[in-house]
Amino acid sequence: MIIATDLDGTLLSSDTTVSRENLEALKRLYQNGVRTVIATGRTFYEIPPELTECEYIDYFIYSNGAAIYKRGEGVIFSSLLSHECTAGVYKLLNTAETFIEFYTSGIPVVDKDKFHENGFAYYRIDPEFLPEMRRSRRGVENFASLIEDKAFQVEMFDVFFRNMQERTECFKRIKTLFPELEITTSMTNNLEIMNKGIHKGSGLEKLCETEGFALSDIVALGDSRNDLSLFKAAGRSFAVSNACEELKRISNGIICSNDEHVMCYMEKFVEESVLA
């Protein structure tokens, strides 16, 4: 069995930390032959170090499936936006009041001029996510100049909108003008933009194809809309109790909340599956 788990709202507690209980359960599961795969909308260096340095996790699907990292080997797959597409989307997003993040080479980079407490409040970034924002983002001066470098490569845009109507309008315009792109969301006022066909589900499929795993052996865990593709690709799926209704409807069941140590719950599930 392989457990493919989302991070925010699932494996991570509401304060965006990894509980000691979850880490200990990850070890016990591994020792009992159960692998764990991280499948997250975050980029690689945004993943808590307790997980990236954990010897009991070998694979990380990140940036919503735009890249896969294998312990001991590094990046084994990536899907990068073309320069023309990156420049066009960036120009379009700047017609609205937005806080734009580029996920590039596994690092989230942001405009240094907006990277401060007043900026977080102005762009309505979820307070629960701010500790991670402060920890992992890299503020860049002359942010717009990044686009001028044709060698600049982007895995994914993560964009926060001050105005929800502008978010809706940008979503529609991107869908119309850039049919080669995929758009999803994991927070109240954000959009996550990748290449068409790139999502957590495609990342899981690519991992299984590359490493010889069977999708039927995967049990997926998640909480938000960007987990829909993951649930559809996996053999079985369970939504946490704090998940969105859309995800709950397509799951095989609903488990505990993200604050109740989901990997401990999965230990019980594995034990019951073996005994059945």
Image (cartoon, helix red, strand yellow):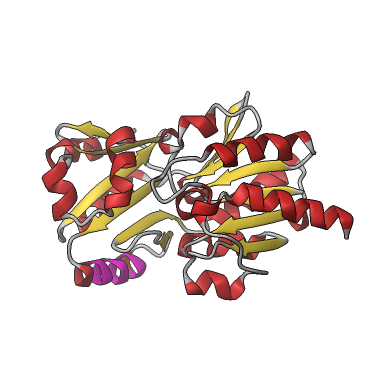
Q: Is residue 153 shown in magenta?
A: no
Looking at the rendering, the stretch of residues picked out in magenta corresponds to 167-176
Secondary structure mostly seen in magenta is helix
Image point (77%, 58%), residue name: 216
Instruction: Find the residue positioned furthest to the right.
Output: 276
Q: Is residue 174 shown in magenta?
A: yes
Asked whether, in this view, residue 266 is left or right of residue 188, the answer is right
Residue 29 appears anywhere in the view: yes
Image point (76%, 33%), residue name: 31
Asked whether, in this view, residue 166 is left or right of residue 224, the answer is left
Number of disc labels: 0
Instruction: Find the residue positioned furthest to the top.
Output: 72
Assign the C terminus to one quadrant of the image: bottom right
Residue 29 appears in which quarter of the rendering?
top right
Residue 85 appears anywhere in the view: no
Q: Nearer the viewer, residue 271 or 130?
A: 271
Q: Is residue 271 above or below residue 22?
A: below
Residue 166 appears in which quarter of the rendering?
bottom left
Q: Provide residue 24's location: percent of width, then percent of height.
A: 63, 35
Image point (66%, 42%), residue name: 36
Asked whether, in this view, residue 237 is left or right of residue 110, the answer is right
Q: Provide residue 57's location: percent of width, then percent of height.
A: 63, 35
Image point (53%, 65%), residue name: 241
Q: Provide residue 78's location: percent of width, then percent of height.
A: 52, 40
Q: Provide residue 59's location: percent of width, then percent of height.
A: 62, 37
